[in-house]
Image (tube, rainbow, N blue to C red):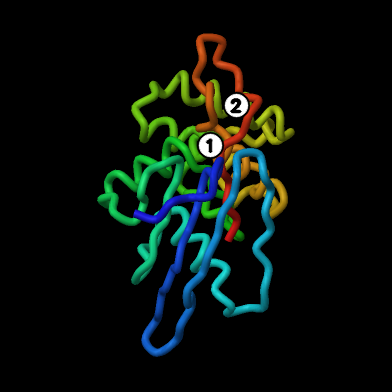
Amino acid sequence: MTTSPPGSLLTARDLRKTYGHTHALDGAEFSIHPGEVVAIMGPSGSGKSTLLHCLAGILPPDSGSITYNGREVTTMSDARRSALRRSEFGFVFQFGQLVPELTCVENVALPLRLNGTSRKEAERAALGWMERLEVDDLSGKRPGEVSGGQGQRVAVARALVTGPGCCSPTNRPARSTPTTASA
């Protein structure tokens, strides 16, 4: 097992991923500490999205290691990686990736519902984040009925809703935020 830099939350070592003959990642390295904000920049096709998908456990690398909070992500089963994403990561994809059949509040509450939170409690937490992001008036609308910018805010609310303390006895949104990726 590769050691992480002291205090790092998420570390990747020697990540490699190919698609046919194309090397999307060729020895990529990454490390982030709690509270850091990182921008991953580069030209189209340089591997940014592939790196983010590997870091999040959405896409397994061909080789290399990814450690999150002391746990080796690359050796986890699909089910454990999915549980990790639902409970500890928040995602805001480039195009929102909201479920069109669900209302906006149901989309925001979805990660909590998948983790076993009651519908009422999950939607209360979802509405709290939607209010903080000033999109609570969209709660009953479907994603196709809202503008792009508003849809992105709904997606941000969904990414934040699983943060630490999201379903506390007071049912107030957490003040600290989970790891968030944008691809």
From what the image shows, is residue 46 above or below residue 64?
below
Q: How far across and how far down the image is residue 76, in percent?
A: 29, 50
> Which of the image's four quarters has the C terminus?
bottom right
In the picture, the quarter occupied by the N terminus is bottom left
Q: Which residue is mark 1?
A: 108
The picture quadrant where one finds residue 16 is bottom left
Q: Which residue is mark 2?
A: 127
Depth order, front residue of 147/5:
5
Q: Residues within 10 Å of mark 2 (few under 14, many from 20)?
A: many
Residue at disc 1, secondary structure: helix
Residue 93: quadrant of the picture: bottom right
SS class of the residue under badge 2? helix
| Residue 151 in the image: above or below residue 62 | above
Q: From mark 1 to mark 2, how far is it between C-alphas?
A: 8 Å
Relative to 14, is 8 on the left or the right? right
Tell which circle, 1 or 2, labels the residue nearer the N-terminal end: 1
Q: Residues within 10 Å of mark 1 (few under 14, many from 20)?
A: many
Q: Amino acid at mark 1?
A: Val
- Residue 81 in the image, given as x and y percentages of width and height: 34, 48
* Residue plotted at (59% across, 39% down): 141
Residue 37: image x %, image y %? 69, 48
**Do tag 1 and tag 2 residues touch (Cβ < 8 Å)?**
yes
Q: Name which residue type carries label 2.
A: Leu
Name the residue rendered at 55%, 15% in the picture: 171
Place residue 42 in its image quadrant: bottom right
Q: Is residue 111 above or below residue 21?
A: above
